[in-house]
Image (cartoon, grey):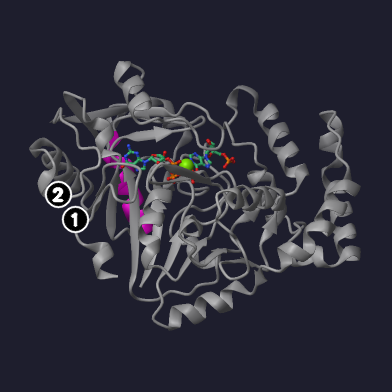
Amino acid sequence: MFYTIIGTQWGDEGKGKIVDWLSSKADLIVRYQGGNNAGHTIKVGKKIYKLNLLPSGIIKNKKCAIGNGVVLDPWALLNEIKKLKKDKIIVNKKNFVIADNVTLILPIHKILDEINETIRGKKELGTTKKGIGPAYEDKVGRRAIRLSDIKYPTLLKQKINNLHKFHESKLQMYNKKISYAKTYRELISMSKYLNSFSVPLWRLINKLGNSKKTIVFEGAQGSMLDIDFGTYPFVTSSNTISGQIFSGTGFSIRNNHKILGITKAYTTRVGSGPFPSELFNEIGEYLGTKGNEFGTVTKRKRRCGWFDSVLVKQSIKLNGITDIILTKLDVLDELKDIRVCVGYKIKNKIYDYFPYDETLYNEINPIYKNFKGWMEPTYGISSWNNLPKNAKIYIKGLEKLIDSRISVVSTGPDRKETIDVKKILMRI
Ligand code: GDP
Ligand code: IMO
Ligand code: MG
């Protein structure tokens, strides 16, 4: 069986927790896009792990892979491996591989990320400044350095020089300096270690796909941050929707593929951009505090709002989602009344989808449906029968609005705090 974990909103839906929950049954867990702009949290008992690049299956010592669709910062990867070692999680050739054709993020990309934000000024995107966008730009510009390049000193030197020449005038204009020689030296010193993980991933993954193995594709970000189908230009630089798993790993289409849409019981967003159901009142503050909504990567306060069924319905279609996994239900426990956005009114016209016309972004007025809160704790509940009546009514109501089944409900950050309504885990 194959499972793809997709964030259906603007990221931070709880993908890390769900991958960890699924990974006991997985033979391979693969990241296929994004980079260390992702922040995936896994809680096991009292211990909290935060991963940016390594797939969440590493916590359970499962075999993990980074696909070619990722942009990989070698410095960040080495730090993450070192940090995990302190927690006695050892990353080695047995449990980790990297696609040999993966694109690398270099120090220059982080500087360019900052310069680009400065140029945007008031219209800044609020990127994570990890160099993600500039690295993808260089990939598409066919000047990027890939993992296999760093094995060859002469080739590497030439490619680094070309890359820096290409960006030189921009750096000069903004008075930024970078040592090409240092980048070169450090990459050479990391080359042997990094390349010890290097494999033609497309071969490995298709071989596994042909045997009866379980592969979990771990998405980063969310569908509304997709470079094509998100709220452009307030998006990340990769395709975050499920179609990306194929070009981001070399895996080919097969049957038995479930696409699990991870969806928060309300909505959050970090960084700039439209957010129709955003709350600017004490309820928004409540969601942020109770949900501990602070960015895993940048520590920024996440913007909070009501569940937006228009957006989630759009994500379901874009990704071919087979099951929704509803997370953070417990965060709504203390609310007397709960609202759900069911449509948009834009310039006197009703929309049942999010339009990609940028000039309309600031004209969107949400239309709401009201639900009654349950006003009792659901935190940690692991059986459907123990949920309060109004919580069940809310979940059933969402199913109708998004026209999809909610197969799993998460009531806490730990893998045990999960209701497997449709017995997904049992059936793997
Ligand atoms: P990801 O980027 O999608 O993996 O999500 P993040 O890790 O950035 O943010 C989700 C946060 O919610 C993390 O701190 C998780 O530990 C936490 N979390 C996940 N599921 C639940 C849940 O059902 N209830 C609560 N209270 N917290 C949850
Ligand atoms: P996970 O995987 C939430 C947002 C940034 C910014 C925009 C562009 O943890 O859900 P980038 O650095 O990618 O160029 O920034 O995308 N963003 C995320 N928001 N969760 C994420 O990842 C994100 N990764 C990027 O805040 O608005
Ligand atoms: Mg996150």
Residue in the foreground of this view, choosing between 263 and 402 = 263
**Which x, y percent locates residue 286?**
32, 22
Residue 278 seen in render: no
The image's mark for residue 62 is none
- In the image, taking residue 424 as reference, residue 85 lies left or right, namely right
Q: Amino acid at mark 2?
A: Trp
Inspect this view and state whether residue 215 appears.
yes
Give x and y (percent) for residue 335: 20, 25
Q: Circle 1 sits in a helix, a strand or a loop, which is it?
A: loop
Span of residues in magenta: 307-319
Image point 15% across, 30% down: which residue?
376
Please tell me which residue is depicted at 59% across the width and 72% down the height of the picture: 201
Q: Residue at x 71, y 69 (%)?
A: 196
Q: Residue lying furthest top in this view?
A: 282
Magenta: predominant secondary structure element?
Answer: helix
Please state which of residues 382 and 144 is positioned toward the viewer in this rendering. Answer: 382
Which quadrant holds residue 125? top right
> CB atoms at circles 2 and 1 under 8 Å apart?
yes
| 399 sits to left or right of 217 | left
Q: Residue furthest left?
A: 389
Residue 210 horizontal/vertical position (percent): 44, 83
Residue drawn at (51%, 63%), measured in percent from left and top? Answer: 30
Is 129 located above or below residue 362 in the figure?
A: below
Query: What residue is disc 1 on?
Result: 421
Q: Is residue 312 magenta?
A: yes
Q: How many marks?
A: 2
Q: Which mark is residue 384?
A: 2
- Local crowd size for mark 2, using a 10 Å CA cut-off: few (<14), some (14–19), many (≥20): some
What is the three-letter code of the residue carrying label 1?
Answer: Val
For the N terminus, the quadrant is: bottom left
Question: Which mark is first along the chain, 1 or 2?
Answer: 2
> Which residue occupies the foreground of this view, 246 or 80?
80
